[in-house]
Amino acid sequence: MREYKSKYDSNLEFDENEWVVSLINTKSGISSIYGGHAKIVVEGLKRSNTLIKELFVAEYHIMEAERMPEETWIPQALRNTQCKYAVLFKEDNKYNRTNQQYAETQSRSHGGIKPADAMKMIQDIKQEKQNIDSGQIAPDFQYAGEWCLYSYQGGHNCTTWAEKKLDIIGAGRHLITDSSKAAPYLHVNSGNSGCSIF
């Protein structure tokens, strides 16, 4: 038996040798159309400089960095408007929500992730953030993401970005299901329920 259970899937446990990675939906949206927001969450144990094991809980995602202020996201999404995005992350050694809040979060989780593989994904995310912040690359955010038939070249929304990062640990297709290239939505299943995540 491992030391901790995932807050997003109580059937999955983790310790310093095997971590849990989840794709979560932080907001409600219009089911099967648009809405929600995707984040990657990593849960694990790390050894500090004093060799004491510490909880490692981290969230990684992107947000549009600029949008037309006079419009809501709906007409922009219908046009698949392009803009820049920012890479955001938060790493902590404790959980910051109530058990009820975790229980209500729509999510899909994958256990047994080797810490070295998870750190490879995390370093890729941080390197992208560094490249964006330094102006080395200009990221394209598209509300419909790269799956949509009317998408432009290479643009991401929060979900297609997450899929690319999760592919680094071999979990992209495991965590993202029911995707469609013909419509900019997908479902992240949580038990028997589903929610649109955009």
Image: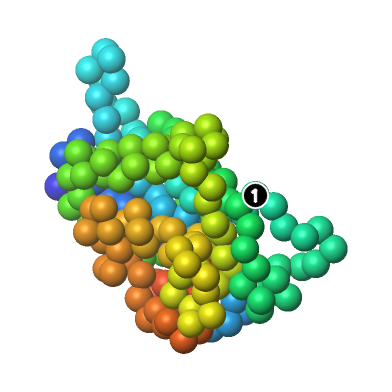
Q: Is residue 36 visible?
A: no
Q: Quadrant of residue 140?
A: bottom right
x and y, in percent, of residue 116 in the image: 20, 39
Q: Residue at x 66, y 76 (%)?
A: 79
Name the side, left or right, on which 78 lies relative to 145: right
Q: In the picture shown, does residue 44 fall above or below 63? A: above
> Considering depth in this image, is 100 or 40 the residue closer to the camera?
40
x and y, in percent, of residue 146 in the image: 46, 70
> Considering depth in this image, is 100 or 127 the residue closer to the camera?
127
Residue ID for mark 1: 65
Q: Residue at x 49, y 38 (%)?
A: 136
Name the secondary structure under disc 1: loop
Q: Residues within 10 Å of mark 1 (few under 14, many from 20)?
A: few
x and y, in percent, of residue 30 in the image: 62, 79
Q: Residue at x 42, y 82 (%)?
A: 180
The residue sitting at the right extreme is 70
The figure's colour scheme reads rainbow
x and y, in percent, of residue 63 in the image: 58, 53
Q: Residue at x 26, y 41 (%)?
A: 120
